[in-house]
Image: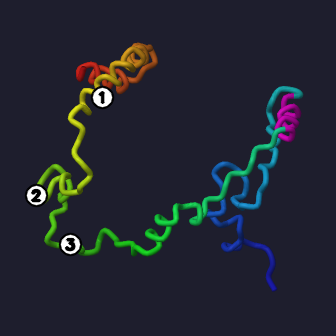
Amino acid sequence: MARGGMRPTAPQNNPMNVNARGGNGQSGDATQAAKYVSGLPYGEGQALMQTQQAAPLAAAPSIEQSSMPSGLASAAASQPVIPLSERSLRPNEPVTAGANAGPGPSMDALGLGTADANADMNFKAQLAEYMPALVFMASRPNASPETRALVARLRGMM
């Protein structure tokens, strides 16, 4: 029997078994292992290692389908995935149905309720509260041109 070599089915080779926040992705991990960092000034590497051991990080929780709300999990499991290359299941309905553009019913047909008539006034009132902070951020020397343009546009809305 051959031994060693790459086994694609081994847990360490499964990309779905890697946890982005550390650990090996297994749900049974209680804590993340302490890791030694080399290249630090004299004594700091050992101090960092001792700090990690004294206050270990909890393992990242596993993401399972059982953690999804029950209605969402059952709905996701019961609906087939339809590729974009498939023919439309509603050939007589325009793709703009439900949007406020193009042919077909507008967003009112969705039955989501009417927009608040005072929504624009509420937005402007809330924006006025944040405007001093936004202007300060845009006036900083390291503010991006996009930030400055956005703040200028928001000021123009008021």
* 150 in the magenta segment: no
Q: Specify whether 81 is left or right of 67.
A: left
Helix, strand or loop at mark 2: loop
Residue 37, given in percent of the width and then of the height, sits at 79, 38
> Within 10 Å of the Cα at label 2, are there few (<14), some (14-19), or many (20+) other Cα atoms?
few
Residue 80, given in percent of the width and then of the height, sits at 39, 75
Closer-to-camera residue (18/39): 18
Q: CA distance from mark 2 to mark 1?
A: 30 Å
State the residue at coordinates (52%, 61%).
69
Where are the magenta residues, as a range? Answer: 44-54
Q: How is the image coloured?
A: rainbow
* 49 in the magenta segment: yes
Helix, strand or loop at mark 1: helix
Helix, strand or loop at mark 3: loop
Q: CA distance from mark 3 to mark 2?
A: 15 Å
The first of marks 2 and 1 along the sequence is 2
> Within 10 Å of the Cα at label 1, are there few (<14), some (14-19), or many (20+) other Cα atoms?
few
Amino acid marked by disc 2? Pro
> Image height check: is 132 above or below 126?
above
Residue 25, given in percent of the width and then of the height, sits at 69, 59
The first of marks 3 and 2 along the sequence is 3
Disc 1 designates what residue? Answer: 123
Question: Is label 2 or label 1 in front?
Answer: 1
State the residue at coordinates (13%, 71%).
92
Disc 3 designates what residue? Answer: 90
The first of marks 3 and 1 along the sequence is 3
Q: Main secondary structure of the magenta part?
A: helix
Disc 2 designates what residue? Answer: 103
Q: Residue furthest left?
A: 103
